[in-house]
Image: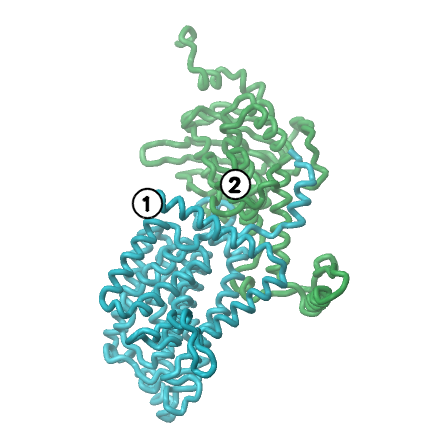
Amino acid sequence: MIDKIRSADRRRVGILTSVGDRWRALPKWQKAIGVVALLVFLYHLPYLGKLPGGLMIPGLNNLRTDSIEGGNNWAGVLFVCAIYVLVAIGLNVVVGLAGLLDLGYIGFFAIGAYSVALFGSVNSPVVKWIQQEFNLPPTWAVTWGICLLLAIVLTMISGVLLGWPTLRLRGDYLAIVTLGFGEIIRIVARNATGVTNGPVGISAIPGPEGPPSADNKVFGLIDAKPWYWLAITFVLLMVVLVRRLEHSRVGRAWLAVREDEDAAAVMGVYPFKFKLWAFAMGAALGGLSGFLFGSRNAFIDPTQFNANLSILFVAMVVVGGSGNMIGVSLGAVLLAYLPERFRDFADYRWLVFGLAMVLVMILRPQGLIPSRRRARELKDRAAEAEEAPAHV
Amino acid sequence: MSDQTTSTSAPKIPAQPGPRSVLLEVDDVTLRFGGVVALDKINFQIYEGEILGLIGPNGAGKTTSFNVMTGVYKPTSGAVRFRGQKVTGRKPHQISQLGISRTFQNIRLFPEMTALENVMVGTDSRHKTSVPGALFRLPRRKPKPHELPQVTAASGIVRNWQQVRRTFAKTFGLSRHILEERAAEAKALELLRFVGIADRANDEARNLPYGYQRRLEIARALATEPKLICLDEPAAGFNPAEKEELLTLIRNIRDMGLTVLLIEHDMRLVMGVTDRIVVLEFGRKIAEGAPAEVSRDPRVIAAYLGEPADDAA
């Protein structure tokens, strides 16, 4: 039975990859139209199924999470999907491209969230201490934009600090150490009450318009649409940047190290350097995601960063298709969206969720959209190569 | 590796009399794994521009000495020097930078990457772009005329777009990343053509036939711009016709100005292509010299065929 499903599945993979090939073969202007259409779709998503004048499109409307009883705010769910996509893209750099199993990714997410909380909120002990030291007014805190930079820099530094001693380890050993790292961050956040307020948490975390208040016109607590648009903008920007890395010397070095570290070293790739870069880049993306999470939530405490989320993050990458950015994004969206959409299954939804994961792993161990290295565009040059006689 | 490289077998450079410059020197190298002596005071030199064969029965220490030369193993004592610089103690990627490259006895390509990408990993080792350069396309420099984007369309919006790109490149320069990518791709393709597998450039390495994989390894090793290339049993599993092609390829590599170190079991291949041969047995060097001399050496014959029963004692 399973074999039958698998062989049917293989045909479907064939179709999927041929879709990819056909897309790559399209002329540039058609691709441009496709990209613009996708952008319009993404930015329009909060209004999915809604027409002006309060009308609903039945089929599309049912996709929304607020179409069911007790469902969450649709734009809010979209925001969570977007920050999870960011996490998945970052973790994909580490796990999918460089082949380093990182089970403590929540640590970077937490550091990102805490860096906006600790420096941006007037309630944080750190900001209070700075106010006291430098005689600043009690309303003073670091602006959101600078917190963003701080979050990225701090997570990159923490990625390097974690990677420096541990990247000598390979495979499972690295996974265990990183799992420990995630837990250490959470426990430190809980116990270092003098710095992080401990289990009490930190409130009044600012958004782009400053600390949460009723005066905020765009980035308020109620309407999640602007938050989603902000997050999706970050996602698109990061997709462009990570793609640049993927299709450069760095991306090739990551793949080479993943495939055969010793052979890569003999070919002149310094594995340690590129693994450290992968950690730093992955950490920065996780931190950015955590930063958006903290900023939107306006309140964080250590319980929001437990190890289960780390496992969920790895699951997104593995289910979606490790190494393929579109695949892992799909994985992230599904794992964030499905539990919300099927909220009316109440407690059974986690059972269904687990079953679905097991099924995916049995039927498609390579993930929903497996990675396939893009054939380089060598149209004219390939033709040239065929014409030229081989020299051997 | 220009297009002038012909497929006719190049004439063998006769061993020149007098001193030649030493490229690599293996100086009293000993390597022990616990109680096992894998290499026992090995001494030999590789001269610039020659093809040196390293032969010996299984377990003689051929691949081990390769691993010492490329930094995979660190010798217990002794040193390897490359153009006067110490190789021992350096990391594998630094040794590759020095100009030593190798292939592997059991093929070790990057299976999920295309053939072209495999070679590009090698060319990358001479490039500088790292994460910031790839992310932000910096630093930029003024492009030479032939590097500028070409305006090919006759008219219309495509032409306008191409003109915009050309002007942009003229004003703001091209990033080192782009130039290096182009150079890497062009060179990788040229190398694939040189070893004769350019027709499968876009196939993943794991999908290539065996002979292609072997030659891809050579192309990848050449891509790091080595002075010395070490081939570890490149003809293993080849049929006679393929071996003949390989011989030509090895000679062509030498004619490019490279020095070749060749480990090979096939005695006919070794005798046909090498200038000198070093013979190892049980981690010791038992003979060294021109192919004809070595093949007459009684110790070598004994090592390969065993001692004749009558002559024993």
Residue picked out by circle 1 = A2
The local secondary structure at tag 1 comes to helix
- Across and down, in percent, residue B156 comes to 74, 66
Q: Which hue belongs to chain A?
A: cyan
| Parent chain of label 2 | B
> From the image, which quarter does the C terminus of chain B lie in?
top left
Q: Is mark 1 in CB contact (under 8 Å) with mark 2?
A: no
Quadrant in which residue B166 is drawn = bottom right
* Secondary structure under the numbered disc 2 in the rendered image: strand
Of B96 and B112, nearer the camera is B112
Same chain assignment for discs 1 and 2: no
Vertically, is A291 above or below B165?
below
Location of residue A122 by image quarter: bottom left
Specify the amino acid type for callout 2.
Arg
What chain is the green one?
Answer: B
Does any portion of residue B28 appear in the rendered image?
no
> Residue A15's spot in the image, x, y percent?
48, 50
Chain of the residue where label 1 is placed in the rendered structure: A
Q: Amino acid at mark 1?
A: Ile
Q: Which residue is mark 2?
A: B81
Q: Residue at x 51, y 48 (%)?
A: A268
* Front residue of B265 and B81: B265
Residue located 52% across and 67% down the image: A38
Q: Residues within 10 Å of mark 2 (few under 14, many from 20)?
A: some
Residue count near mark 1 (Cα–Cα under 10 Å), binned few <14, some 14–19, many ≥20:
few
